[in-house]
Image (spheres, rainbow, N blue to C red):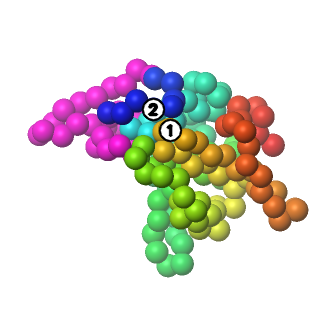
Amino acid sequence: MLSLNLPTFNVKLSEREGKTFIFDSLRRRYVTLTPEEWVRQHFVHFLIEQKGYPAAWLANEVTLQLNGTRKRADTVLYRSDLSARMIVEYKAPEVEITQRVFDQIMRYNQVLRVDYLIVSNGIRHFCCHIDYQRNSYSFLQEIPRYEELG
């Protein structure tokens, strides 16, 4: 797999029937290793190990109902009251982060109404804070530490 702009971690891989799987510590199972999954696993470990996010409040592949269809948010950070606080959307490293990617995560936010949106392809990461009272948003210079979240 490609080298990413994220810290390395103790990757657990498994081979079965010619396919490679990676262990997802949030889902507590091996999942098919794709370029996007490679980014997800690195980013989740970055949030937990480098930024202090509690693993217990993170979930991967969260199903949403949006306009009568089922969608899946890649990773969601929750508060202790189980309301969503952040959505993270991943793309494979070769996928450029475009307005279309932000449009996708904004659609998910119509359902979850979170304070933070993150988009990453493992090389470039964008974090946006949403201020609902001012009806505005701002891009942050870096991914905030957990204790810095407002």
User: Looking at the picture, how far across and down is residue 37, in whole percent?
Assistant: 38, 43
Q: Quadrant of the N terminus?
A: top left
Magenta-colored span: 9-37
Front one among 109 and 138: 138
Q: Residues within 10 Å of mark 1 (few under 14, many from 20)?
A: some
**Quadrant into which the C terminus falls:** top right
Q: Which residue is mark 1?
A: 123
Image label count: 2
- In-front residue for pair 84/141: 141
Identity of the residue drawn at 12% across and 39% down: 18
Asked if the magenta segment contains residue 31, the reply would be yes
Task: Answer with left or right where residue 145 lies relative to residue 32.
Answer: right
The furthest residue to the left: 17
Residue lying at the far bottom of the rendered structure: 68
Side (left or right) of 68 relative to 1: right
Asked whether the residues under the numbered discs 2 and 1 touch, taking CB atoms below 8 Å apart as contact, a structural biologist would say yes
Against 43, residue 62 (above or below) is below
Residue 134 visible, this angle? yes
Check disc 2 and report the residue beneath it.
Answer: 4
Judged from this view, the residue extending furthest toward the right is 134
Above or below, 70 relative to 35: below
Residue 82 part of the magenta segment:
no
Q: Mark 2 or mark 1: which comes first in sequence?
A: 2
Callout 2 crowding tier (Cα within 10 Å): few <14, some 14–19, many ≥20: some
Residue 78, can we see it? no
Q: Which mark is residue 48?
A: none
The residue sitting at 60% across, 51% down in the picture is 87
